Amino acid sequence: MKGDYLKQVVEAYEQRLQQKRARPTTRSSELGTQIMLDYFQRVHRAQEEGKPLAWVSFGVPVEIFYAMDIVPFLVEQFAITVVVQGFREGKGFEYFDYGIGTGFSKEACTAHIVPVGMAKAGVLPPPDVAVCSSVPCDSSLMTFEVLTDMYRCPSFWLDYPYRERNGREIDYFRQEFADLIAFLEEHTGRKLDPDRLRETLEISRETNEIYARILELRKTVPAPFGGREGWNIIMNIRYVDGLPGTLEYFKAFYQETQEKIARGEGHLSDERHRLIWVGGYPFFFMRVIDWVEEQYGAVVVGEAQNSVKHLVGGDTSDPLEFLARKAAGFGIWRVFRDFGTIAPELVEQAKALKADGAIYFASAGCKQGCGITRLLRDTWGEAAGVPTLILDGDILDPRVTSVAQIQAQLQKFFAMLDGS
Amino acid sequence: MSKLEELRRAYQGRFQSWRERKAQGQRIVGWVCTYIPEEVFAAAGLLPIRVGGGARETPLGDAHFYANTCTFVRNCLELGLRGEYDFLDGLVTVNTCDHIRRFFDVWQHYLRTPLTQIYHLPCKISATTEEFFLEELGQIRRDLEGTLGVTVKDDALRESIRLYNRTRSLLRRLYARRSRENPLLTGAEALEALLPALVLPKEEYNSLLEGLIEELEQRPSPASGRARLMIIGSQIDDPEYYRLIEEQGAVVVIDDHCYGTKYFWNPVEEEGDPWRALARRYLQKAPCPHMHPMGPRLEHLLALARDFRIQGVLYQTIKFCDPHAEVFPVVWNAFQRAGIPVLNLEREYLLAGAGQWKTRIQAFLESLEA
């Protein structure tokens, strides 16, 4: 794969959208593809349209950027998308080599080795600014140090308080977001319109409330949707929160899900196992979700990010207050707190989801995730009676654990579950 | 017995010493990161000690951690699970890195240390983060009062700050003797002299260190004419690593890791509010990769390199240490621009692969001579 990757990704999404329109399935499926197409088109056109491009890390809320007409670009996730597409064509591995060739750690998360490699190869759209958060991990922060050193662009580091402190963390977040806005105004020339931010946040508020209701629906037996949709809603709410199309997508998905439940219809006609999947997927083998459904009647009813409370809501009349409370309550980020704080919620959720098994995908480069494999396995096992398979592999590199090896580990796990 | 030998023995005998002190009624709190403000614990009448490793093998640590957890925290946990730290009244840390965060999680779950807490360390320096960190220090105070029933009075804190500053000042004096044309001690000796600071009451340590500094002035330089190196990266608490380096014909004259200058380089202001002074000092001390952006850290490293007139840098990282290993390109670029060669070395917490290290260091030193 060479050339303009953004253009290739845009074209791939355009094709996907055309296919969905030609053979419609659900409205939300088409809307989900549309919002992602729009996202990549914005990034692709940013320079041409004279809009500042902000490289943002996984833990940075995007609403401020959309409200200021700055284009947020989740560079880590883009690298994953490109390389996985490349693997299908037998290419993409060169970015691992380029990344390591800069002196970047070969034991780093591959989702970070690859963007460093792509940056070194000059195939990423250059940033005007970079914003990185202290969630979820060291690797994300250090990667942004390397990237900002390469591109010599202004950077802002969004600090997430590690513990809840009786509301002091809200005040802290407020100031952090005020500082972020000041940074963006200074370095992009864009001025924040508070009314526009309120509008964006109002959409975000409604979207997140629907998102939380969707997560509740997963507790239904049979599960109304599976792992692919579960992963999609996590990603969609990260990339494009605060936009009208995103709200429309979530409304459609929620309605469809409610209707399925009303019909007594499950994602699987023969649901035999309900799984929580932790730690990301082998993105080169997303088909693993379909495979466990087909082979074992196993539906993914939750992910780690959706296994803690998603506490987003309230009043948007004070935008900084809303943003602060959202950052403090956003499930996808809360899960990266200290284990003692989130463990009761993880247990409660495992029971509420009626999970009978968990898969912990232990990606070789993920230190903060893998650090609690034993802890989570013991906690779920003892407190919720849920056995956990620790599945060795890598989210991006199929050379670490092959598809066959992944399937072999899963086969043994399901043999145990089926026998129990 | 020389003061250096006394210091070596003090460190080697630390576990026995701790148990004896505990038996005499001294309460002890273990800490894992140099961003923990020891002065607060000392002011409460507690003995703060650095939790470290030392087990030759780590079967219990291996059973509780995944393969990609760093061998330092793995080793610390090993000793904890073996009961070697069962005398602790507390185990405290901050969220400096993913390995320490998860070490804390596992320790808290499987071990029953009375006070187990992790505090928030901001990832940058600003007026906002200083205020928040100041509040975290207040949380430490409340946790000590609530769990261990000890109080921290401002006067005791000021006294503690003065005592710890004395340690820092003495260690700066020790290091000044390494900055000389003919260093008065090797890097291995300097590490051996520093290690007891992390495990002894400061009054006892300061007395030993004062004696050592006097003794050093009486002896010839053990490291004249050798290539002067700086060592940066993951923590090193084993002087054998330094000996291995120095046996190849170099001398390590300065370091930047948390069993070195990161521990003591910056004093605490002794005027004004002691809590704010602590918050400011600990947040702004010789920075670790946890702090962003890296510009101030790079300036600090280059200043050390200049002041100690180093010829080369050994950048060493414990395997899986993302904070140090991943930012190597940034540090390397900075030293390249300054015209200082850098050798990148990977290691485990305990000395292993000595042959490989020797070969690479020899080649590096030859390149410095060329």
Image: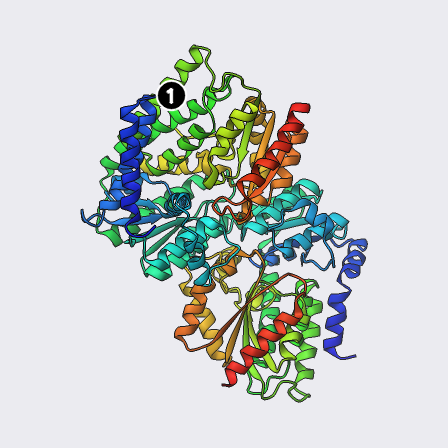
Give the amino acid type for the residue marked by disc 1 in the picture: Tyr
The percent position of residue B192, horizontal first and vertical second, equals 68, 72
- What secondary structure is found at the residue carrying circle 1? helix
Which residue was labeled with disc 1?
Answer: A254
The percent position of residue A223, horizontal first and vertical second, equals 49, 20
Identity of the residue furthest to the top in this view: A263
Q: Is residue A24 visible?
A: yes
Question: What subunit carries mark 1?
Answer: A
- Please rate how many residues cluster around mark 1, counting C-alpha atoms within 10 Å: few if below 14, some from 14 to 19, many from 20: some
Q: Nearer the viewer, residue A287 or B183?
A: A287
Q: Residue at x 63, y 47 (%)?
A: B66
Identity of the residue furthest to the front in this view: A90
Q: Quadrant of residue B116?
A: top right
Q: Which color scheme does this rendered protein use? A: rainbow
* Above or below: residue A337 compared with residue A225: below
The percent position of residue A111, horizontal first and vertical second, equals 45, 48
Q: Is residue B94 visible?
A: no
Q: Is residue A69 left or right of residue B46?
A: left
Q: Is residue A391 left or right of residue B60?
A: left
The percent position of residue A393, horizontal first and vertical second, equals 55, 44
Q: Nearer the viewer, residue B33 or A135?
A: A135
Q: Nearer the viewer, residue B150 or B126?
A: B126
Q: Quadrant of residue B361?
A: bottom right
Q: Quadrant of residue A324?
A: top left
